[in-house]
Image: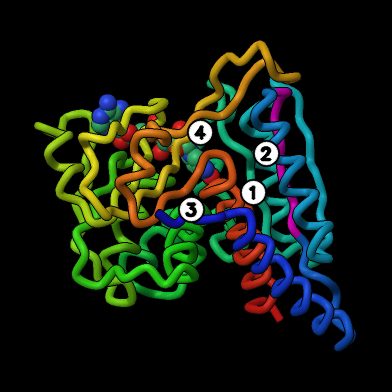
Amino acid sequence: MILIDGKKTADEIKKEIAEEVKLIVASGKRAPHLAAVLVGHDGGSETYVAFKIKDCEEVGFRSSLVRFDDDVTEAELLAKVHELNSDPDLDGFIVQLPLPKHISEQKVIEAIDARKDVDGFHPENVGRLVLGMPAFLSATPFGIVELLKRYQIPTSGKNCVIVGRSNIVGRPLSILMSQKAVNATVTVAHSQTKDLAKVCAEADILIAALGSPEFIKADMVKQGAVVIDVGTTRVNAPETKSGWRLKGDVKFDEVAPKCSHITPVPGGVGPMTRVSLLQNTLLAAKLKK
Ligand code: NAP
């Protein structure tokens, strides 16, 4: 069994990005610039945004943080989005989700200029992905495909089962995995799938993205399968300083011995999601110039 080290792979990609940034700056151009918009004080969102800012520093990007209180109106947030869209010194930005209930996430996503949509959530980028055109790819699917590539895991003709069909993970990932560069035969499973255990057990590549801790058990996994665990659920852990720990969707201890490759949680898909945002921002900066 090979443990897929997402942290190590992401660190390698960060080094490659940092080298490119050095060349950009040496040629007299400014460093790529990413902004993050954070609404409210949700613990998870605060952590994710802090990581994104830290990642920017590590590779030599400029970063900006735009904060709003929970009671910001939709109109105020949309006005900020329009301002960022037209800021010539900014290459890309993200609006950290989820947003408070009184704000339409879809409206906000659609207001972002697709050329600065480094999260890859704008319908134009999703449409381009579906058509196989160059696009900003949603960070988690982008990171997973990159991980498979860098570990030289064969995908062509393989039976890939993805559990979960969300707009940010399962659905875009199913499209990427079925594209000609990857060539997997893809099944997308969800909460209405009949006999899920049997469907999963037929997978050469099983990707769990449902958000249910330790849902995938050993009897749902084929001997020799590649298992990618996207799930990150915070579960109570009084023994830790924070009081919680991250659990994946896969019961790691019993599944790992059956696998040819498996990602851990944490340290698997998460770091790759973060680095994909940097890759998208670098691409946005290059396209602009
Ligand atoms: P989501 O929007 O809640 O979607 C979950 C999907 O799983 C839905 O399609 C749902 O089916 C399906 N599902 C739920 N329970 C199921 C069950 N018992 N059997 C079969 N299918 C089931 O979640 P998400 O945003 O895609 O995130 C999924 C997980 O990945 C979460 O733990 C999240 O925290 C994690 N995540 C991690 C990263 C990372 O970088 N590591 C990034 C993004 C998300 P229906 O459509 O039928 O409801």
**What amino acid type should be assigned to the residue bearing mark 4?**
Thr
How far apart are labels 3 and 2 at the CA level?
Answer: 24 Å
Q: In which quarter of the image is ligand 1?
A: top left
**Local SS, label 3:** strand
- For the residue pair 79 and 112, the one nearer the viewer reads as 112
**Quarter where residue 166 is shown:** top left
Does the residue tagged 4 have its C-beta within 8 Å of any atom of ligand 1? yes
**What amino acid type should be assigned to the residue bearing mark 2?**
Tyr
Q: Dominant secondary structure of the magenta stretch?
A: strand
Question: Is the C-beta separation of discs 2 and 1 under 8 Å?
Answer: no
* Quarter placement of the N terminus: bottom left
| Residue topped by disc 3 | 3
Residue 121 in the magenta stretch? The answer is: no
* Quarter placement of the C terminus: bottom right
| Residue topped by disc 4 | 232
Task: Judge depth for marks 1 and 3 and give the one in front.
Answer: 3
